[in-house]
Amino acid sequence: MAENKLPFAEGASIHRPPMFSDINYEFWKIRMKIFIESIDQGIWDAIINGPYTSKYTVENVQVDKPWTQWTEKERRRAQYDCNAKNILTSSLNMDAFFRVSQCRVPRKCERFLK
């Protein structure tokens, strides 16, 4: 019987994100997008649009709104950021995790996974 040496040889799980194995980044990226969108489209939106911070205007200047003044909807949006970070970091092996853990701008981290 032929042995499958490709990544993700086992069936997918609806409860665990696909693990990144340092090869076949494009395949992992597509699988990860599908996995995240299946949990909540808001999480994928947080990944695409970056962290959410509630703001309000004071004397024609946008300032961060204190957490204690956030609405339930604003807190839920901010929670998507936390969920996204948890899912993404849970899918990385230790080497990949340490390569991206120092990144400040998520889109720039993508180059460390290729």
Image: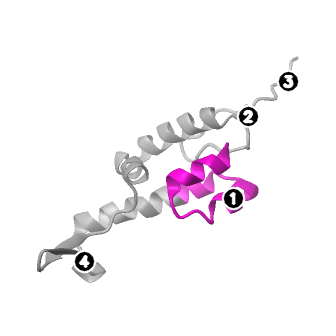
| Residue 70, quarter of the rendered image | bottom left
Dot 4 alpha-carbon crowd within 10 angstroms: few under 14, some 14 to 19, many 20 or more = few
Q: In what element is the residue under mark 2?
A: loop
Mark 3 vs mark 4: in front? 4
Q: What residue type is disc 2 on?
A: Pro
Q: Position of residue 47 (x, y in %)?
A: 43, 51
Marks 4/2 in contact by CB < 8 Å: the verdict is no
Dot 3 alpha-carbon crowd within 10 angstroms: few under 14, some 14 to 19, many 20 or more = few
Q: What residue type is disc 1 on?
A: Arg
Q: Which residue is mark 1?
A: 99
Relative height, residue 4 to residue 67 (above, below):
above
Q: Which residue is mark 4?
A: 65
**What residue is shown at x 46% (from left), y 59% (from top)?**
83
Mark 1 or mark 2, earlier in chain:
2
Q: Which residue is mark 3?
A: 3
**What is the C-alpha distance between the residues marked 1 and 4?**
32 Å
- The answer to whether 21 appears left or right of 3 in the picture is left
Q: Which residue is mark 2?
A: 7
Q: In what element is the residue under mark 4?
A: loop
Mark 1 or mark 4, earlier in chain:
4
